[in-house]
Image: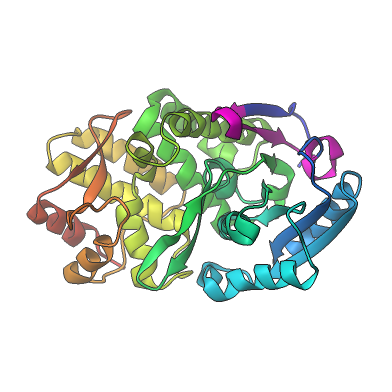
Amino acid sequence: MKPSVPNSSLTIDLAERSYDILIGPDLLLDASCFDRLGAVTGAVIVTNTTVGPLYAKRLEQTLRQCFSHTQLIELPDGEVYKDWNTLNLIFDGLLGTGADRKCMLFALGGGVIGDMTGFAAACYMRGVPYVQVPTTLLAQVDSSVGGKTAINHPLGKNMIGAFYQPQRVVADISTLSTLPERELKAGLAEVIKYGPIYDTRFLSWIDQHLNDLLALDPAAITHAIRRSCEIKAEVVAQDERESGLRAILNFGHTFGHAIEAGAGYGVWLHGEAVACGMVMAADLSCRMGLLDSADAQYLQSIIERAGLPTKAPALGLSRYMELMQVDKKTEGGVIRFVLLNGLGTAVIQSAPHDLVAEVLHAHQGI
């Protein structure tokens, strides 16, 4: 991908925990993206067996210009490894080399690596700094921003974790050139998400530029990442720990997380499950009289054009209800959904069981 657009940056405003998001091509080669990060000495790159061979050496060479020494920890790749055993591999690597509180972790990879590295940073010696270096579209527009860190449990996705903000996010769009097409499409689900919950103009822009995004046009990708991060930054600045507003960012996730867990972690990519979950949540919004059916169909058409699934695996009503009970938005045993009160406005509320059952019946098909 040729760097035909200028670099972009914005700030997550969280008082003393504020940090910058840098977006652009070839940032892994730019030492200025990784300097002025505080009184730290050692840099520890945490990556996986897929991303490591592609980009770890490139990042390590750049970090050597800023830090006295570097270390590489390589984890197995895949959502199925987002667990305690793999998390301990990070701690093994840190303790094995005597890493102290002056070390800084660099999460080089997608959402799994970002979540696990952030959680490890929150726990190691009760907290060491870390930097997000997302290499997938999904991570660049969502999971690397906002400080959510977690691992999965067999009974629920991202149920064990902490809120722990990074020192910086460095989103190098050049890394998207090696992203498999399926992963790119999955990342677009999280881009699409921001439109119906917050910005209908952005949704229209996505609709008009979907082919450019699928073709990794640098200008289109940069704008999509920046606008997605701007929206998330605005929401997180108002509700860092998800006590209210921030939960709207989980549009499609109540159904989506159930799909991921029910199908078996890694069978469905996170973005694929969220895409299907958005269609289901929009349908539920219609059945509750909140959303016009034409708007729900418009959203579904964009998701379908992006090559994302709109039919969920046939797990059965009782299994879906069981899985959604462990959703983090559930309160007092009552499942709460992110719904659309018209395009551009999200609300968080419970839904009648019979309407949820209708949605699950209508959308199970694979």
Q: How is the image coloured?
A: rainbow
Residue 51 image position (x, y, % from top left): 71, 61
For image coordinates 10% across by 55% down, the residue present is 353
* Residue farthest toward the bottom in the current orientation of the protein: 85
The residue located at (43%, 31%) in the rendering is: 235
Residue 40 left/right relative to 356: right
Q: Position of residue 119 (x, y in %)?
A: 56, 57
Left or right of 55 in this view: 154: left
Q: Can the viewer see residue 349 in this picture?
A: yes
Judge by depth and name the residue closer to the eye, 349 or 23: 349
Check if residue 110 falls in the magenta segment.
no
Instruction: Report whether 275 appears left or right of 348.
Output: right
Is residue 12 shown in magenta?
yes
Q: How far across and down, in percent of the image, does residue 269 sit? A: 48, 61
**Left of 180 or right of it: where is 286?**
left
**Quarter of the figure with residue 37:** top right
Residue at 67% from the left image edge and 39% from the top image edge: 168
Q: Which residues are magenta?
A: 11-34
Horizontal and vertical percent for residue 164?
A: 55, 47
Q: Quadrant for the N terminus, please.
A: top right
Where on the picture, by quarter, is residue 247? top left
Q: Nearer the viewer, residue 279 or 22?
A: 22
